[in-house]
Amino acid sequence: MSDIIGIDFGTTNSVIALRDGEGRVATVRYQVGGKVLDTFRSLLCFWAEETGPSRGKLQHAAGPHAIEAYLDDPLGSRLIMSMKSYLASRSFTETRIFGRSYGLEELISLFLRALAGHAMGGAALGAARVVAGRPVRFVGEQADDALAERRLRSAFAGAGWESLDFALEPEAAGHRFAAGLDGAAHVLVGDFGGGTSDFSLLRYEPGAARRVTALGHSGVGIAGDAFDYRIIDNVVSPRLGKGGSYRVMGTALPVPPSFYTSFARWHRLSLMRAPRTLREIGEVARAADHPEQLHHLIRLVEDEAGYALYQAVSGVKAALSGAEAAVLRFRHGGFALEETVRRADFEAWIAPELAQFGGAVDQALAEAGLPAGAVDRVFLTGGSSLVPAVRRLFEARFGAERVAHGGEFVSVAEGLALIGAERVAA
């Protein structure tokens, strides 16, 4: 059997898994600085060269390299994110980047070529049979699923993969798990990405004539990034003036909370570098009870230090999945932060997101016409499935004995590669 690759093109992160002719499945990896990663951020960054022989020529980078390019010059570049979320939108036809028009399919093709091109070891991915994931339903108001699939197929063709199969992402996520089922079962698959979380009710019928039927689905536009936001909002922003006061003609006024809305999202930090915004923060600082806090905020904004802060916060979030407390350490210029974050506090902060997860599960069950008691097994995947409060939400609803999790970042891609092998064998 020839090589087969599964491609999980995600809203926030993307993953490729390769099944070789010997039946071995491995995730394609990426060298990022001194780290080796299984995931590749679903981002593009465009900029125009200002000097040299390529002066004025439009350049682009993808994944972690797009982040580096953006942080080098956030005001002189254009960051493209969440491309997948526009696939089903008829109103999105093109966007103009430094005067040039780009269709959505072209943008995704550029990203997919980089996704394969940056793979370690020079993996020959171009000639392999491809199985790509697709959601049960694409996101968006009045989403057109047929349009989304056509666009995605066109984007893959533009990246060099003319021969393409699709498989449902939740089916792929639970593929290894479902292989262990000893009979037909209703399985709820919860897939928690960086920016979206999807819940799908599937009926698995294992055996020689294995069949998977989608019965119900629901999704919410929140996941891991929202959890990071809660840590920044509750631990970091108060050290930068949020919740404080300033005085105007002897009257105490609250520091505008709007200063911190964009601050907690690293990719929106450049919006705060507008002269008017920095001037407003400076004016409040002059009359603030703790002006040094707002001066630190200004310095962090001017120096585009948000991404480094975001990485530190993500590390604490991950640590809290296995510990009752973790220390958030961050230093930039004169701002030094060393705060203990307790898991109990973190779980209280993310209570609104947990409630939305619960509501989405209810919606998926209602669409499937099944009560919770009819769900035989629950499989959770994605980074946020490691958060104990998330697991408890499902254990309380369905019973701990029915809940399993695994392959938190790579299960979809690996499942797609395995599904491709089964289709070839059939």
Image: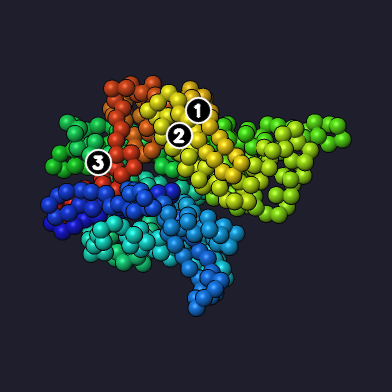
As shown in the figure, which amino acid type bears the numbered disc 3? His
Q: Position of residue 177 (x, y in %)?
A: 24, 36
In the figure, is residue 105 to the left or right of 410?
A: right
As shown in the figure, which amino acid type bears the numbered disc 2? Val
Residue at image location 72% in from the left, 38% down from the top: 291
- Specify few, some or many for label 1: CA neighbours under 10 Å numbering under 14, 14-19, or 20 or more: some
Label 1 residue SS: strand
Which of the two discs, 3 and 2, labels the residue nearer the N terminus? 3
In the figure, is residue 360 to the left or right of 202?
A: right
Res. 316 mark: 2
Rendered position, 339 above or below 396: below
Q: Position of residue 318 (x, y in %)?
A: 41, 34
Residue at image location 63% in from the left, 33% down from the top: 238
Determine the image quadrant of residue 259.
top right
Q: Which residue is mark 3?
A: 175
The residues bearing labels 3 and 1 have C-alpha atoms spaced at a distance of: 36 Å
Q: Mark 3 or 2, which is nearer the eye? A: 2
- Whether tag 2 and tag 1 are in contact, CB under 8 A, the answer is yes
